[in-house]
Image (tube, grey):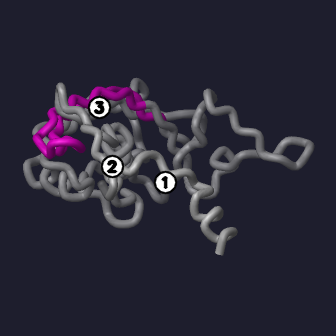
Amino acid sequence: MNRPDPNTESAPLKLEVGVAKLPQNGLPVRFEASEEERAALAERFGILSVESLTADLLVRRWKRDGVEVEGRFRAKVSQACVVTTEPVAEAINEPVDVIFVPDGSKLSRIAPESDGELHLDPEGADIPETFTGDRIDLGAYLTEIVGLALDPYPRAEGAEFSDTDTDPDPDGGKVSPFAALSRLKTS
């Protein structure tokens, strides 16, 4: 299944949040995708449908200029089974925990170690995302979460690949890979 990169074009989900003046305790954000947004998301990722998509988030200040977004993202989608092409329902329930910093911030770069190499910890925190101006489009981030959470090989319950023999002469016995070489030698 060919899934486009969500970063190459505008995201089907739109959720802009103003971050210039966030409340002390953070700004709660509840998002529910419209029917048009869900249809555009299904088309974007080449899946059958997106039945529901919601996010409960808390947007608050992080350090001096950064923004932290925490919460939970839920969706119900249907994809085609890779064996039978029957619809396969899938529930997505993912935590949201991301830091955004202004474009050009020192916090958005990884400082190289003294040996000149970049050392990344696969279990460590992600590098902060960047934003420009005083608004963050969380729709693009939520679109990315959907793409990453989708099962790449959805399979209907009980669906199995069957063995298919592609040998043109199944009764001819096993052919040695050196059989062609032995024919050349005798010629």
Single out the residue that lies furthest toward the bottom.
187
Magenta-drawn segment = 68-96
The image's mark for residue 141 is none
Which quadrant would the N terminus be assigned to in this image? bottom left
Residue type highlighted by circle 1: Phe
Q: Is residue 124 magenta?
A: no
Whether residue 169 is visible to the viewer of this picture, yes or no, is yes
The residue under label 2 is 170
Q: Is residue 66 left or right of residue 41?
A: right
- Evaluate if marks 2 and 1 touch, with contact meaning CB atoms under 8 Å apart: no
Sequence-wise, the earlier of marks 3 and 1 is: 3
In front: 176, or 78? Answer: 176
Sequence-wise, the earlier of marks 3 and 2 is: 3
The residue under label 1 is 131
Residue type highlighted by circle 2: Pro
Q: Quadrant of residue 127?
A: top right
Sequence-wise, the earlier of marks 2 and 1 is: 1
Q: Nearer the viewer, mark 3 or mark 1?
A: 3
Helix, strand or loop at mark 1: strand
The image's mark for residue 73 is 3
Dot 2: within a 10 Å radius of its alpha carbon, few (fewer than 14), some, or many (20 or more) residues? few
Question: Considering only vertical position in the picture, is 69 above or below 9?
Answer: above
Whether residue 30 is visible to the viewer of this picture, yes or no, is no
Residue type highlighted by circle 3: Phe
Q: Position of residue 151 (x, y in %)?
A: 31, 38
Residue at x-position 33% and y-position 55%: 169
Separation (CA) of disc 3 from disc 1: 21 Å
Q: Position of residue 124 (x, y in %)?
A: 63, 29
Separation (CA) of disc 3 from disc 2: 52 Å
Q: Is residue 111 left or right of residue 70?
A: right
Residue at x-position 54% and y-position 34%: 62
